[in-house]
Amino acid sequence: MNKEEKFVITISRQFGTGGHEIGAELARRLDVKLLDKQILNEVARRFCAVENAVENIEARNPLWRDDFTQFYRSYMAGAEYSGQEHDQTSRQLFEAQAEVIRKIAAQESCVIVGRCGFHIFRNHPNALKIFIHADDDCRKQRIGRKYDISESDAAAMIVDNDYSRELYTKTYTGSDWQDARNYDIALNVRNFGVNGAVDFLMTCLSPLS
């Protein structure tokens, strides 16, 4: 990746690894745009979503995909779509989201968290694709502290969210979400923390500047 030209950094992450925070801090240090909630906002506007649905989708919480799915179901039920049309429209919404991401990336350098960015920019000539992971114990401890919940509840959240991300990725890209071959860097953040992980990634980038 050449930082002297427009670049794209994509971050995929296991739930509970601090991947979003890592992406935000990386974008801040590189002084580039972080793409996350504004993408859904733009796509929702394209599909004439009401404002409270947009706000619900954008809520920064570990179950955002559940909100997203519920929004889809409510929207499609209200529009009286058939099951086949539901699937088609959901895929159209994914493609519309990808189009928005590509348009922004064509105009300026950016860091993209989630949204199957690794797939959208798989053939991009100046993209760095990162996967953030950690062992379950590390993630349970982090989730437990962040949300003040028990270890068993944290473990359930890990299973639910990881499964949701895997299913979402497989459905719309045909790729295995945790396959290291999709990425340029796979980083275990157990002993790093957010700032330590960003320090390491900046070190990886600095020889290319």
Image (cartoon, rainbow, N blue to C red):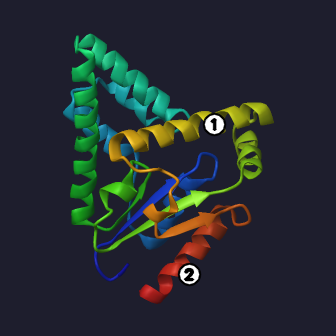
| Residue at (28% x, 74% y) in the render | 125
Is residue 146 visible in the rendered image? The answer is: yes
How many C-alpha atoms fall within 10 Å of the one at disc 2: few (<14), some, or many (≥20)?
few
In the depicted structure, whether residue 73 falls above or below residue 60? above
Occupied quadrant, residue 3? bottom left
| Residue at (57% x, 41% y) in the render | 162
Q: Quadrant of the N terminus?
A: bottom left
Q: Quadrant of the C terminus?
A: bottom left
The single residue placed furthest to the bottom in the displayed view is 207
- Three-letter amino acid code at the position of disc 2: Thr
In the depicted view, which residue is nearer to us: 132 or 178? 178
Residue 159: assigned label: 1
Q: Nearer the viewer, mark 1 or mark 2?
A: 1
In the depicted structure, whether residue 130 falls above or below residue 60? below
Judge from the rendering whether residue 133 lies leftward or rightward of residue 3; answer left or right: right
| Residue at (54% x, 32% y) in the render | 63
| Residue at (77% x, 46% y) in the render | 141
Q: Which residue is mark 2?
A: 203
- Three-letter amino acid code at the position of disc 1: Val
- Point out residue 204 in the picture as x, y percentages from the top left corner: 53, 80
Chain-order first, disc 1 or disc 2: 1
Occupied quadrant, residue 189? bottom right
What separation in Å lies between label 1 and label 2 (alpha carbons)? 32 Å
